Image (tube, grey):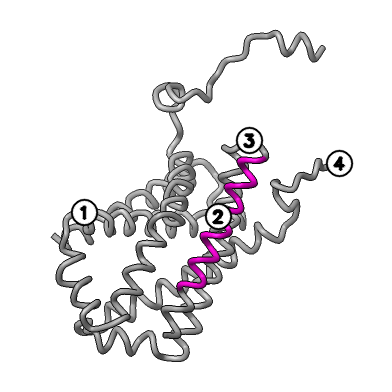
Amino acid sequence: MVNRVVTGAHYGLRDWLAQRITGLVMAVFSVILLVYLLSQPALTYASWKALFERGWMRVAALLFAASLAWHAWVGMRDILMDYVKPTGLRLFSQVLCLVVLAVYLGWTIQVLWR
Amino acid sequence: MSSAAAKKERPKYLSLPALLFEIRLPLPGWISILHRVSGLLLFFPLAAWLLYLLDASLASQEGFDRIREHYLRLPVAKLGLLLFVWAYSHHFCAGIRFLFLDIDKGLDLKTARITSGAVLAVSLAITAFVAARIW
């Protein structure tokens, strides 16, 4: 039987699959944004601001940020499970990661809908 | 039996000097550990730094000019940008490679080595290209 610990993995396919799907979502967004920016003549404040005021861009950027949070959580948890052995320290580090990711997400929303 | 196993001297192959000087990782191993290192760097501090840049550059015309004309011209900011470009391209390319490995493509040794070399080369080439552009 699997010895279930609270700071361990979630013993299933879900996070593994989520990390791959969120990775793909971010990859597609990155390529689209890169191609768009490279196709623009010269970046000015007006065009930069206009880009992030478009509805689809806000939704896509939020989707990217949410994907990043989930993806990075799985990745950071894997790293911490490999290198941080004491349960208390591992729990603390994992909570710290979640707090940082929540701050990133909140900051992104605040930047996008200002 | 367990006590006999416990008494037996075990080689400590995961000490730092062993990791640095004794264990010679094959190329796909380097891609894997660099994927982890780049992921960690992207999580912190690079994501926070990029969010700061996005925030400041979208806030106002002055912020945009400050970031573009002053801040990103500092050598240390350029180095930070290059670190981001390398970490993002490596994580991106290695990630795509891992997705193919997940669906059992490119598992044989020869292909695995070739794709590893490609991941390393492409991400370094993108970084060198950006370095040439910003200097």
Tell me the quadrant of the picture where the C terminus of chain B can be found: bottom left
Q: Is residue B95 magenta?
A: no
Separation (CA) of disc 2 from disc 1: 26 Å
SS for callout 2? helix
Separation (CA) of disc 1 from disc 3: 35 Å
Separation (CA) of disc 3 from disc 4: 21 Å
Separation (CA) of disc 4 from disc 2: 29 Å
Work out whether residue B66 or residue A29 is closer to the camera in this orientation and state it: B66
Residue A108 seen in render: yes
> Which label was assigned to residue A85?
3
Asked if labels 4 and 1 touch by Cβ distance under 8 angstroms, the answer is no
Quarter of the rendering containing residue A50: bottom left
Q: Residue furthest right?
A: A1
Find the magenta span and give its range.
A88-107
Which residue position is annotated with label 2?
Answer: A97
Q: Chain of mark 4?
A: A
SS for callout 4? loop
SS for callout 3? loop
> Which label was assigned to residue A1?
4
Which x, y percent locates residue B55? 35, 74
SS for callout 1? helix
Q: Chain of mark 2?
A: A
Inspect the image, locate mark 2, and give the three-letter code of the amino acid beneath it: Cys
Which residue position is annotated with label 1?
Answer: B76
Q: Earlier in the sequence, mark 2 or mark 3?
A: 3
Is B121 displayed left or right of A24 in the figure?
left
Is B87 displayed left or right of A1 in the figure?
left
Q: Earlier in the sequence, mark 3 or mark 4?
A: 4
Asked if labels 2 and 4 touch by Cβ distance under 8 angstroms, the answer is no
